[in-house]
Amino acid sequence: MLDALDPKAEQFLGEVREFLDESLTPDLVAAGRLTTGVFSDPRAGRRWAKLLAKQGWLANSWPEAWGGAGWDPLKRYLFDSECFRAGAPLLFNMGIRHIGPVLMLEGTEAQRQRYLPGILSARDIWCQGYSEPGAGSDLASLKLRAVRDGDHYVLNGSKIWTTGAHFATHMFCLVRTSREGRKQDGISFLLLDMDSPGITVEPILG
């Protein structure tokens, strides 16, 4: 913790501590303390995300113009430090940290209106579909094909090592839309609903 804070930071720190004391139930703390990886039990994490969303603190690094809290680095540091101290669950936050900022910078207005509210409310959970069998770090070798069919793409192939796929509602993924020219030039970035017809999620066992 920092040695000294100005009055506004002290006030903010008090608000954070009060919120954590009121919101972190024993089962959420237990889930946080039992975390062995980069995120806690998904059920506890989602409950915690919804509480943060209700408070307006889930997307605390997002600009206020996009529905975030617009916190500066000091506020984010204080909040993260207090969450760690209190034993809060670690969030599976690819929506907040990955696809949300991409949509803010590069998405169409229709995409922002469709997807950002679900991220902000913790209704939607996003996973990342990059690696494939035979195309791990070498993404230029990926083979999952996406063929345009009217207003849609038909996907044919598979992804692997997709963390969170078994509980995610959406995926942002890299697909092959062309085999012309350099392999890298034929890769596109797509967003998809995990409940789309034809999607099967299987565990990697053994």
Image (cartoon, rainbow, N blue to C red):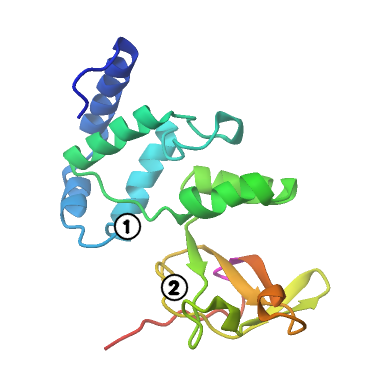
Q: Residue at x 60, y 71 (%)?
A: 174
Determine whether, in the image, residue 12 is placed left or right of residue 36: right
**Mark number, residue 162:** 2
Query: Where the C terminus falls, by quadrant?
Result: bottom left
Whole-percent x, y for residue 150 in the image:
83, 73
Determine whether, in the image, residue 47 is placed left or right of residue 182: left
- What amino acid does circle 1 point to? Arg
Residue 22 highlighted magenta (yes or no)? no
**Farthest-out residue, front:** 182
Residue 195 highlighted magenta (yes or no)? yes
Q: Secondary structure at mark 2?
A: loop
Prevailing secondary structure of the magenta residues: loop
Q: Secondary structure at mark 1?
A: helix
From the viewer's side, name the closer residue of 124 and 172: 172
Magenta segment boundaries in residue numbering: 192-196
- What amino acid does circle 2 point to? Thr
